[in-house]
Image (spheres, grey):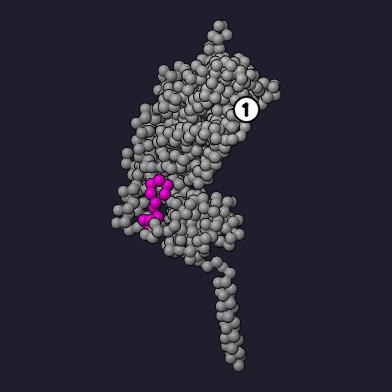
Amino acid sequence: MQAMFTAKSFNRLAALAALGILLAATVSAQTAPRAPRSTVIGGKAVVMVADIVYAFPEARPTVLAVAGTDQGLGSFLQTVDPSFPSKPALDRSAGAEVYAALKPDLVILKASMKKSLGAQLDALGVRSLYLNLETPNDYYRDISALGAAFGAAGRADELAAYYRGIVERTQAPTGAAGARKAPRVLVVQSSLAAREAFDVPPKSWMQSILVGLAGGDPVWFGANPGEGWGRVGFEQIAAWNPDVLIVIDYHETVDATVAALRKDARFKALACGKSGKILGFPQDWYSWDQPDTRWGLGLLWLAKALRPAEFVRLDLAAEAREFYRLFYGFDAASFDRMVLPRLKGDYALDK
Amino acid sequence: MLAAGGLALSSAALIVACLLAGRYPSPGFLDPRRLFSDPTAFAVVFSSRLPRLAGALLLGAMLGASGNAFQMVFGNPLVEPGFLGVSQGAALGAALALAAGATSELAVMGAAFLLAILALAAAAFLARAFAFGGWILRVILAGFAVSSFMAAGLAMVKYSADPLRELPDIVYWTMGSLSGLGWRRLAIASVPALASLGFLYAFRWRITVLSADEAVTSSLGAKPALERAAALAVASAGVASVVAMAGVVSWIGLVIPQAARLITGSDARRSMPASIVLGALFAAVCDTLARALLPGELPLGAVTAAIGSIVFALLLLRGKVRVSR
């Protein structure tokens, strides 16, 4: 009798629990945002946003429209998504109504766009997701947010692990092994008057963070207290006399600018000129210094450039091959055909 | 004679001081002996500072001279050389070129000069076409309309520019800077600027006549409409060339002519050379500050505005802002 009662009670309890789970799942499905079926990627600095969204295969088929992603060296995403050229290209300054007209389930923008578009998109009932993408820690958080939005937590973990692995690999040694003097590094963006004026990034930007992570001593900190690029002249560069001068060029291939600087008698007289350490930051469709998905490659390259003895075996082309496979599904043949010919700058560090 | 000699000597000393002041090898003045022992010091002074100093002298001289011409012709101490839309036109031209991805400095300079001249032509056309007021009022209104139109265009280009690639260049350009000025860009800007300066210097006695009332001007044998238009067009073309070289640099053309007239009196025969010299020295000092004060470059337009506005306020406090007819 006792055993029968127990079995009956157990069956009732199990039925109740199943009902509870079913109800909870129903309520949850009604309240939690479902994975978007249509997505729009826009705003300024859209390159960084679009490239990380496209690293999620779950997100790619949902993309309805993207703002212009060509920084001057071509549009990368059409190599990932054959339908990309047929998608409407939005203006980077498009207003909330333009996004609403596309009736997307989700609009993904850089966090800096929230101030100008956030309230309007909310008022129009358009769901939006804002990504910071300015530092490695931002990347971990933003990747996680994208994973949650697209129901792809596993993929998010995989991508975050890739970046964490690179940061660990490039960490400068401490103690006796790390007692060496950090090379004095200057990172400049070549300006319109390429050989006469140069722009340095602010301390908080990815370029500056990467130099620190790679074990360099950034000489320009303090020269640019602002939030954008700050200009310095040749004589300030001469006063800093950096051991390594790293040149970024977003407008065109960096090789011509670097070649001109190497020939310039003034730069030849500096420490970086004497040691042959005037280097062009690698680039393909985009320069690897930016807070774009390629920042991991940029960090690896910087580590090898600044601590060559520790990274003798690091093959940047192989690292790039792995990056394109993991993030965008490029097989070896696709990489050789589409990416390899585009690699510019001193990516091989063979000089 | 002695005073003129003293003035020339102090001007030369100031120019040498500007050449030696900077960030290399440390903030302050470079020991001239270092020029013979340190190749980098030699390169800094002769390849980097010297073209820039020459550019500053040209820029200041042109803005001072044209400012004086504008203020004399309009009989108004509050007009400045960019007010016919030339500066805003040049800024829009440069911004359009930069937003279109132009990487050649010649392309940017060319676009700036072209739109500056276009703005001048538009202002001249509107001034003739307006059916309202006398010629001075019409020119002022036309300049106001063209400047506003060009400024609106500039705002739109800036708003839609890529924040990473284009916007910093556009913003920096609109704040004025001689950073990155090499001999080639200086040589290109020098041709129209020196021609304009030469004309204004040679025409200075006529500018004094043109500053008089219409009846007096005509009775002295001048053709006021034609000669005023010629003076303004040549001054604006010179301004367009230096703005294309250095970006928008405000206040020099407004304040320097007033300081010059304070010293020499309103007669353009004396105030014009004084405006040229004072403008050149003022721009040289401001650019040295922009280059040497901090590790990062300060925009030249911000430095001239900061100092110029203080000078302007002092002149106003002393009741010295006027054009005597």
Is residue A201 magenta-colored? no
User: Would residue B137 be seen by someone viewing this image from the given angle?
Assistant: yes
Where in the figure is residue A160, as x and y percent of width and height?
Answer: 46, 57
Above or below, B126 relative to B31: below
**Residue at image coords 37%, 30%:** A264
Residue shown at 35%/38% (left/top)?
Answer: A256
The furthest residue to the top: B2
How many other residues sit within 10 Å of disc 1, few (<14), some (14-19) or many (≥20)? Answer: some
The correct choice, above or below, for B298 with respect to A348 in the image is above
- What secondary structure is found at the residue carrying circle 1? loop
Quarter-of-image position of residue B148: top right
Residue A136, position as x, y percentages in the image: 49, 50
Above or below residue A323? Residue A32 is below
Say which of A4 and B222 sits in front. Answer: B222
Residue A71 is inside the magenta segment: yes
* Position of the N terminus of chain A by quadrant: bottom right
Start-end of magenta stretch: A70-80
- Residue at label 1? B78
> In the image shown, does A221 or B83 lie closer to the viewer?
B83
Amino acid found under the numbered disc labelled 1: Leu
